[in-house]
Image (cartoon, helix red, strand yellow):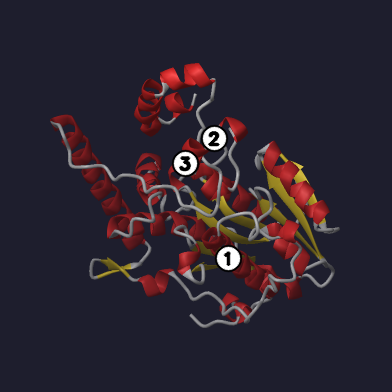
Amino acid sequence: HLCRRVPQFSSAMSEQTGSSQSSHAVSGDIPAVDAVASSLQVCRRYFRKSHCAKGEKCPYKHTLTERPPPIAKPGPAKNHNTRKRRRAAERGLEHAAEAARRVLAGVGLVSEGAVDMSRVFQPMPTKPEGIIPWHQIPAAADIGAEVHPQRAQRKRWQVENMANLLAKMLPLYPGGLRVVDFGSGSGNVALPLAWMMPQVQFLLLDMKPHCIRLAKERAEAAGLQNVEVLQGKIEDVDVGKFDVCLSVHSCGAASDLAQIAAMKWRACFLMCPCCLGKIAHEHVSYPRSAPFSALGKEDFSVVASAADHSEELCESRQLCKIAVEYDRKLAAEEQKYEIWLTKLDPVEASPKHDVLVGVPQELLRGGSLSDFLGVSR
């Protein structure tokens, strides 16, 4: 079974079987499995997610103390068809970047042929030192004990950013605050916040039953009385009135659906979108803002697909990512929201580190969002 599933051991096992066939036949011994099992590759899925759906049937080793081998990068093109596909991809990226540059120039963000980043992104409010005492959080509510330390650190940075921004919202709702975490997963972001802010009610919504089941178990184990869970799709579930929308790395159109749900109830929103290449959705019409409507649905889809690879820090993909996030910003401003487009602090917290903060104008009572957040443009 191991030989068939793990190619690198097939030859070794066949040699071992051939050389010792007679001795086994005489003695009746079974070849030791420990030596083979100890040299198995580390399961990539288990290393990244601390969970593997195959369980005991997985042919690879489940451990967090060893790293899986690096994925081999593709070599040079071996045939004409491969080169043609790569050239076509390059031309598609150039087309997407030109479309993004054209639409960003239409809203005054391009100066001398380049995007003025100082006009696109604002600074993230400074986090207080030790905003979340991680050493005090119950193990069930903390991601740190379950995953690789590097991933745990990145996730903690993300939670600290959301905690800092959510704390700014508390004075707006002296009568109590209800937060809905759209695309919550198993609660890696919401559960530490719920422990930190027991006066705030949290609803965790996710379409995956196993994520919601795990979130409920973690909340009960941590003794959190201010957490509810609900399984379903954003567009199908009525969560009722809420005050703050939380959406961290909700894939594709889920970020837009969460923002639309927030604007329906005139709620604030804290969003860190990802997976932009999957934004096509029957309940959302793209582009969403009037200034970007000249781009057209087809070109916008090309731009969003190019923006999906933001870990590749080339200028063309950055332009596309900015265009998609700025479309979301303008769509909210058309609904009388004040928007703060910023980045996670530090940006190493995630390759997808753009953050949208939205507050209805009526809640600011004539003040500016920069003063409300305590930062200057």
Residue 103 visible? The answer is no
Question: Closer to us: mark 3 or mark 1?
Answer: 3
In the rendered image, which residue does mark 1 sit on? 357
Q: CA distance from mark 3 to mark 2?
A: 12 Å
Q: Are marks 1 and 2 in contact (CB under 8 Å)?
A: no
Residue 61 visible? The answer is yes
Q: Are marks 3 and 1 in contact (CB under 8 Å)?
A: no
Whichever of callouts 1 and 2 sits on the residue coming sooner in the sequence is 2
Where, by quadrant of the figure, is residue 82 drawn? top left
Checking the image for residue 313, the label placed there is none
Can you give x and y, in whole percent of width and height, for residue 349 in the image? 50, 64
Can you give x and y, in whole percent of width and height, for residue 365 in the image? 69, 76
Considering depth in this image, is 10 or 110 the residue closer to the camera? 10
**Apparent side of residue 267 relative to residue 249 in the rendered image (left or right):** right
Where 114 sits versus 3, above or below? below
Can you give x and y, in whole percent of width and height, for residue 43 in the image? 50, 42
Q: CA distance from mark 1 to mark 2?
A: 25 Å
- Would you call the spot at circle 2 few (<14 residues within 10 Å), some (14-19), or many (20 or more)? few
Q: Secondary structure at mark 1?
A: strand
Residue lying at 48% horizontally and 44% vertically, measured from the top left: 42
Residue lying at 77% horizontally and 65% vertically, measured from the top left: 195
Residue lying at 64% horizontally and 54% vertically, measured from the top left: 146
Where 283 sits versus 154, above or below? above
In the rendered image, which residue does mark 3 sit on? 278
- Would you call the spot at circle 1 few (<14 residues within 10 Å), some (14-19), or many (20 or more)? many
Whichever of callouts 3 and 1 sits on the residue coming sooner in the sequence is 3
Which amino acid does the dot numbered 2 rest on? Answer: Glu
In the rendered image, which residue does mark 2 sit on? 282
Considering depth in this image, is 153 or 287 the residue closer to the camera? 153
Which amino acid does the dot numbered 3 rest on? Answer: Lys
